Amino acid sequence: MAKGKKKNQKKPHNRQKPSGKPKPQKTNQPKTTELTCTGLTDDGKGIATWNGKRLEIPHLLPGEKAEVAVPKRGPAKVVNVIEAADYRREAPCPYFYECGGCQIQHMTEKAQGDFKQQIVDRLMKPFGKPEPIMTMDHPYDYRNKNTMTFGEAGKREIIGGLYKQNSHDLIQVDRCLIHDPKADDIIGTIKKLLPSFKLRPYDEDTGRGFLRHVLVKTGKTSGQVMVVLVTGTPEFKGKNNFVKALRREHPEISTIIQNINTRSDSMVLGNQEKVLFGKGFITDTLGGLEFEISARSFYQINPVQTEKLYGKAVELAGLTGKETVIDAYCGIGTIGLIASKQAGNVIGIEMNKGAVKDAIRNSKHNNVKNARFYQGDAGEFMVNMAAEKKKADVVILDPPRSGSDEAFLSSVVTLSPERVVYVSCNPETQVRDLHYLTKKGYKVKEIHPVDMFPQTYHVETVVLLEKNK
Ligand SMILES: C[S@@+](CC[C@H](N)C(=O)[O-])C[C@H]1O[C@@H](n2cnc3c(N)ncnc32)[C@H](O)[C@@H]1O
């Protein structure tokens, strides 16, 4: 195992007190005990009680009896499952128990769907019964955005992999089961090429070395592939030959970008980019439209499920070709542009400048004439629209995990659209916002959970609200 970052590690010290009496060492030696799991948290951890204390234990399932190691600090760990639940399975990924990327691979696929359905059913109970969750036929290989981090282990052995759960320790990962396999092949080739070009992984502490991460984006429909080499320094010795060698092994690559990231936080990408080969972006098709995807633009990571999610959102909007539709928190304009085919006009609002530029470019690229995109805070934008007595027939909103805010929601109430379609990647904050809207004259009509992120605990929901008659 390699260290991706050593900054927070304290140096050990051996000094003793002058009295000669050694200070007792604080140990974190775990106690191993037998526990029975009584429930599951919404992030997929087993719940058990030990010495009157509630424990949340990764990889343990309700009804199971297990030997569990309980340290003084940090998470408890399953040592041995004594009685297994009938929906437990051998996790298909060999890195599952170490890597933090997936949390529920030890459940059968049916159980994963049931688990997410139960969460949504419970949270949405005040508003009605949710529809059955939309699951995926092949819940693997789905990510179109794949990142691996580079570091070193032992005697300068290069590691290209993922962080261990809750840490900055890297695990060598040759194949991540939810990544696009093509992406992992390319990352493997890059790892193999590094020594022959005398390129090393970047070390944040010393500022030496070169490669921090490799990000590979793939267009599932177009087959186009973007490779982003995230480097800690701008110098790239032998870059032309490196690009040639990589393309020789992977002629499917459409564009290669060097992204320079000198930051010390956990952001993968920096602000500076150089296009080394190709156009610097790829395209992909979604909802019958073609979207340009750049290294830094937000694009839903599971295209198969996104078709279902957006399809449902547009269907719930109930458009007849005349309506004014607001696409709030619109990102690169995907939902609004897809809806524009059936709407009178679309107004998109988004905070991120780059995403708004992408949305405008995408509308031109698809010859959409009835959509306008604005940059700003969605709440402020809606307050202004309400103050100017503007009209909206349908509001579609897809806010970040933190949900929407009162400025936005109160302006929705003032604008008084017939329908509100609320897409969310966090049903908890969505429920909070639904309580607000249902107290102010709206009624929840339909609730649809969508499994956008199989093997993880995350669940997406799309909810239709209508104005009380
Ligand atoms: C979950 S993404 C949805 C993007 C888009 N609807 C899609 O499906 O690709 C949420 C978006 O909200 C934007 N955002 C966050 N806070 C915002 C705010 N206060 N006002 C407007 N947009 C905001 C983010 O930049 C991000 O693009």
Image (tube, rainbow, N blue to C red):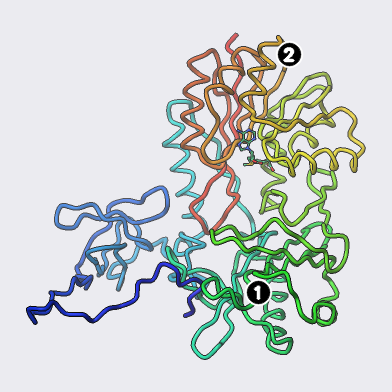
N-terminal-most mark, 2 or 1: 1
Dot 2 beta carbon under 8 Å from ligand 1: no
Residue at position x 61%, y 25% from top? 379
Task: Looking at the picture, tell me which residue is in the foreground, 357 or 86.
Answer: 357
* Element under disc 2: loop
Q: Which residue is mark 1?
A: 211
Q: Would residue 89 be seen by someone viewing this image from the given angle? A: no
User: Along the line of sight, which residue is nearer the eye, 189 or 126?
Assistant: 189
Would you identify the image quadrant in which residue 267 lies? Answer: bottom right
**Crowd band around label 2 with a 10 angstrom C-alpha radius: few (<14), some (14–19), many (20+):** some
Residue furthest out toward the right: 367
Q: Position of residue 454 (x, y in %)?
A: 56, 56
On the image, numbered disc 2 is attached to which residue? 391
Badge 1 element: strand
Q: Quadrant of residue 145?
A: bottom right
Q: Is residue 402 above or below residue 194?
A: above
Please name the amino acid that badge 2 sits on. Lys
- Can you give x and y, in whole percent of width and height, for residue 278 in the image? 88, 65
Give the vertical position of 469 relative to 465 (above or below): above
